[in-house]
Image (cartoon, grey):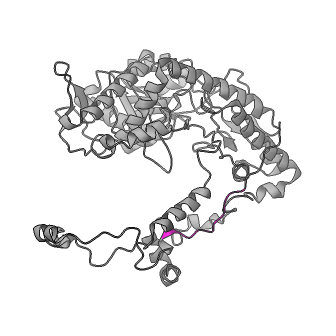
Amino acid sequence: MSTPREVTQARWNEPVVMEMGVPGRRGAVFPAAEAEVAAAVGEASSLVPAAMRRRAKPALPEMSEPDVLRHYLHLSQEVLGMMNISLFGTCTMKYNSRLSEQISLRPQMADMHPYQDPRTLQGILEIVHEFDLILRQLSGMDQFVFQAAGGAHAAYTQTAVTRGYFAAKGELEQRNQIITTIQAHPCNPATAATSGFEVITLMLEENGYPSIEALKAALSNRTAALMLNNPDDMGIYNPQIKEWVRLAKEAGALAFYDHANFNGVMSKIRARDLGFDACMFMLHKTFGGPKGGGGPATGAYGCSAELAPFLPKPVVVKDEASGLYDLDYDREMSVGKVREFFGNLHIVMRAYAWARAMGAEGIAEASDISVLANNYMEKRLLAVDGVTKSHPHLDEYRLEMTRYSLEKLKEETGIGVAELSARMVDFGVDAPWLAHEPWLVPEPFTPEAGEMWSKEDIDTWCDVIAQIAKEARENTDHVKAAPHNAAIHAIDGSALDDPARWATTWRAYLKKHGAQARRAAG
């Protein structure tokens, strides 16, 4: 172990942008229209219907362009982000190549309109269709759509398709249960409940996954679907998964594979080969698309030919005779739309660029490196006094991530994952994902190296964990007071539970804080 260097963040004490500006200041001043133009079109305000015209000017800060640029540069300097070492687990956070970013900003993508005639969208529709074919190869499914705005939304698409499928068979009233596991991502039971299904959750057993006997006890003629991810966030792969799917299908249910944790098994297994009827991929994670600040995102949803008639519409189709692409809205059994238009196609374009750049061999190699890096990281972390892993009695290698616990360190020093996360900021690395609720492992943290981080990066990250564990025993108060070098130190979070105090918009802030806030805004 080497002692990691600490990093001091820029600290600007920057106001929010709504508190800035001077009346009359502008970033750009537009010239008055030429006389001929004004004569031809009249007053610009006359082009806006009276009912849509503002009665007062918008409450926006009036700033020059340098003011705006400097403000957001300061904010970026105060924020730790993906350009630091970020082993953010259960999300497969990857570097987003500048090439893919530039491609997605080209006018052929950025300036398109969803109501354009499909004949003017041939390039984009071709990319969607070609990427559909790539995902078919990786999954064995027969059709993919990209409307879903993320992983949870793709799970919701599955519940919508499930409803449509059993409604068409006249069995929806009977088949009103969906089975999942306690370690499945929460979007699976949540979307099932949202769609009106009763959720049956299976608990983990000695081997790290529910038993066949528990599944058999849950299955019945009321089961509509089995929804789960494999491997789970503890890195454990259920080797009985084919039997699980067989039993579900034997009971007349559908089987859905949540592929959020695809990184460690991509090119190694295919959902359809395991018997699944449908699966989803997170393009904003596994396939190199950006994931930050809550979006944008895309959950690619794929299914068998039997379920394809129920897919959300429109579906991109290719006329083999002419070679042209079209949007198929004429789908009588479709569940309709799960969101507007076609989905976040700029994320699809990024994912397509990533897949083509990697190629089949690159994707296979990335999967190998991901598993290797995870198990190297495990050796490093388990050497730290106070760190343990989930199901410590299981000696098998874990896949793309492992869930660790600071329970021992917390009991011995009072330092748990909250204090660890805050102190990590002082070393210029991002804190890891902890765990979905409910916490099955006390004081959990779930790092994931993936294929993009170097051995040196992983060593640095593990050195930070080891250093904080050492400090926890030698200078507990120092750790508890962290972060020390960040733009903002430890904050009082009590306002987060008080709806009378917190506000998510400037308008709400002014409403809740009244004249005092208005005076502060100038």
Q: Quadrant of residue 355?
A: top left
Please say whether residue 14 is one of the residues in the magenta stretch.
Answer: yes
Q: Give the image location of residue 387, x and y in percent.
A: 77, 38
Residue lying furthest right in this view? 474
Q: Quadrant of residue 88?
A: top right
Q: Is residue 505 above or below residue 21?
A: above
Q: Name the residue rendered at 86%, 54% in the picture.
A: 475
Q: Name the residue rendered at 67%, 22% in the picture.
A: 397
Q: Give the image location of residue 414, x and y in percent.
A: 79, 52
Please say whether residue 309 is one of the residues in the magenta stretch.
Answer: no
Q: Name the residue rendered at 49%, 16% in the picture.
A: 243
- Residue 269 appears in the picture as rendered: no
Q: Name the residue rendered at 63%, 64% in the picture.
A: 493
Depth order, front residue of 280/51: 51
Q: Quadrant of residue 281?
A: top left
Depth order, front residue of 171/354: 354
From the viewer's perspective, is 365 left or right of 132? right
Give the main secondary structure, helix, strand or loop, of the magenta stretch. loop
Tell me the magenta residue range.
Answer: 8-17
Depth order, front residue of 509/289: 289
- Residue 126 appears in the picture as rendered: yes
Q: Is residue 503 above or below residue 163?
A: below
From the viewer's perspective, is 278 left or right of 115? right
Which quadrant does the N terminus fall into?
top right
Q: Is residue 96 above or below residue 25?
A: above
Q: Give the image location of residue 110, x and y in percent.
A: 33, 45
Q: Give the image location of residue 276, x and y in percent.
A: 41, 21
